[in-house]
Image (cartoon, helix red, strand yellow):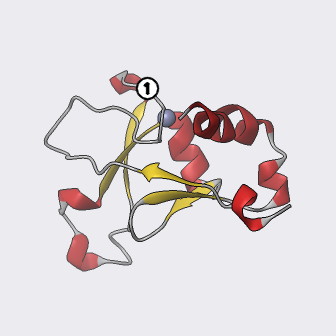
Amino acid sequence: MEESATTHRATRICRSSQKNYHFKCCFPSCNIDDPQFLIGSHIARWVDNPDMRGQTSNGLCLCVLHDKAFENGYFSLDNDLRVVISKKPEIQNSTVFSEYIKLFFTRA
Ligand SMILES: [Zn+2]
């Protein structure tokens, strides 16, 4: 499989403001906006980056599924906050990947 097919960079993921409670999942093309299904994540962990503590620009709002996928390495973010999909075969071949990660990119 060629590199461009496996490393898919899409629209920049948005930064969320913790002051704004009208959250929506930041994952490209995901429209989940029910607060019960949204989690405020941090791009850089405060433990590793104490200078970023309290900075809202470090915030990221994801739905439970994309939050879990991010946490488990299904995708990561580059320095420009673009989504970089994992190239690991076990992830690429998983149902979660085909239903909730890859699908959103083909929809975008
Ligand atoms: Zn989502």
Q: Measured from the top left, where is residue 47 in percent x and y?
A: 36, 74
Q: Is residue 95 left or right of residue 61?
A: right
Q: Quadrant of the N terminus?
A: bottom right
Q: Which residue is mark 1?
A: 31
Q: Measured from the top left, where is residue 54 in percent x and y?
A: 18, 62
| Residue displayed at 74% across by 62% down | 87
Task: Locate residue 50: give its quadrant.
Answer: bottom left
Q: Nearer the viewer, residue 87 or 50?
A: 87
Q: Residue furthest left?
A: 19
Q: Is residue 95 left or right of residue 68?
A: right
| Residue displayed at 60% across by 56% down | 75
Q: Is residue 93 left or right of residue 40?
A: right
Q: How many marks?
A: 1
Q: Is residue 46 above or below residue 70?
A: below
Q: Is residue 85 above or below residue 46?
A: above
Q: Measured from the top left, where is residue 96 in percent x and y?
A: 72, 37
Task: Locate residue 58: give its quadrant.
Answer: bottom left
Q: Amino acid at mark 1?
A: Asn
Q: Nearer the viewer, residue 71 or 105?
A: 105
Q: Secondary structure at mark 1?
A: loop
| Residue displayed at 57% across by 45% down | 68
Label 1 C-beta lies within 8 Å of the nearest ligand 1 atom: yes
Q: Measured from the top left, where is residue 26 in percent x and y?
A: 40, 41
